[in-house]
Amino acid sequence: MLALAGYPLGLQFRFYDSSEGPASHLAHTQVGAFDDLEALERFAEGLDLVTYEFENVPVEAARFLAELLPVYPPPRALEVSQDRLSEKQFVQQLGIPTAPFYPVQSHADLLEGLGQLGYPAVLKTRRLGYDGKGQSVVHNPEQAHETWAELDEQPLILEGFINFERELSLLAVRNPDGQTAFYPLVQNTHRQGILYQSLAPAPNIADLQPLAEEYAKRMLLELNYVGVLAIEFFGDDLRVNEIAPRVHNSGHWSIEGAFCSQFTNHLRAMLNWPLGLSAPKGFSVMRNLIGHLPDPAQLSPDFYLHLYGKGPRPGRKLGHITATADSPSGLEALLSGLDETADPK
Ligand code: AMP
């Protein structure tokens, strides 16, 4: 999607991946391991800059490339966000609220943490967790014991369970000159831990948007950030759950729903061009196509279909649909239409 946004701007792309991915339909993909420094060096030859859109790229690979050419977002952002503990500490140090947490390295830590945070609590792996993987809600001591047996041998983090009424996310963007732009807060719903739908703007955010932007500004400045940063919040008291140093699924609505999409703005930021207008054009929905696809011929032309060229598999994000209305009631109509055609039960 970055390349699709970049070609009209006259940019050219080359991809590096551990296997031939969907982007190889668009431009050459060099297949290689992320720890193969020679291959990474060959990849970097002739490039002006590098970005990544997968947060499990090893930070060593990003740092190695950063010695050869600009890598955006800065590798430190990748490092901070790859470990749920350093991420929470980073956020808290900036005076921004998170769920209460307790680092867990041993069974004794787990009991101590549960004593402090109480039940229910959420036990998560510190690294490589996404889409709800590598985590469990713990309701009682027996469950804590079982979860520990499943997840041990890895550094873990215990979090207090937050009873939030909704999940929100903010996409922020900054260029090297320090110009910033912020998309409206988006309301996200998940199915089986996977993002299912984003509404943009989220309803009733007038009082929340300035504080969310203030939090984002603190992070952007502290990281000397360049590119798009996604921040996920629990509830209207805006407790940060996660940050993602990349273009984000909850910003896909912006391709048709904002004056300048997150992808175009990520590229403009890296090139130190003036940022595009992040304002919404109306009321948008983005729905992920998870595991199965609708028949494109049957889909109303009101819906913009984005297929990723991936083989179907349960739980896999295969594409998404966006639609934009000029009023909240228009959005309601689009949502019912989506229920009928894009997501048949
Ligand atoms: P994560 O992988 O941290 O984004 O967590 C996946 C999902 O689990 C979140 O989107 C929440 O719905 C839920 N979750 C994670 N942590 C907590 C928490 N501390 N309290 C309540 N729900 C949580």
Image (cartoon, rainbow, N blue to C red):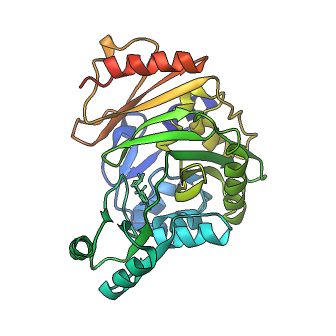
Q: In this view, does 149 lie above or below 240?
A: below
Residue 261: image quadrant is top right
Residue 194: image quadrant is top left
Q: In this rendering, does residue 247 appear at all?
A: no
Q: In this view, does 88 lie above or below 284?
A: below
Q: In this view, does 325 lie to the left or right of 220?
A: left
Q: Which quadrant does ligand 1 occupy?
A: bottom left
User: Is 133 or 310 nearer to us in this picture?
Assistant: 133
Q: Where is residue 105 in the image (x, y as percent from the top left)?
A: 36, 83
Q: Where is residue 233 in the image (x, y as percent from the top left)?
A: 54, 52
Q: Is residue 281 above or below residue 48?
A: above
Residue extending furthest bottom? 108
Q: In this rendering, does residue 238 appear at all?
A: yes
Q: Report the residue at 34% width, 57% height from top.
A: 32
Q: Position of residue 65 (x, y in %)?
A: 53, 63
The C terminus sits in image quarter? top left
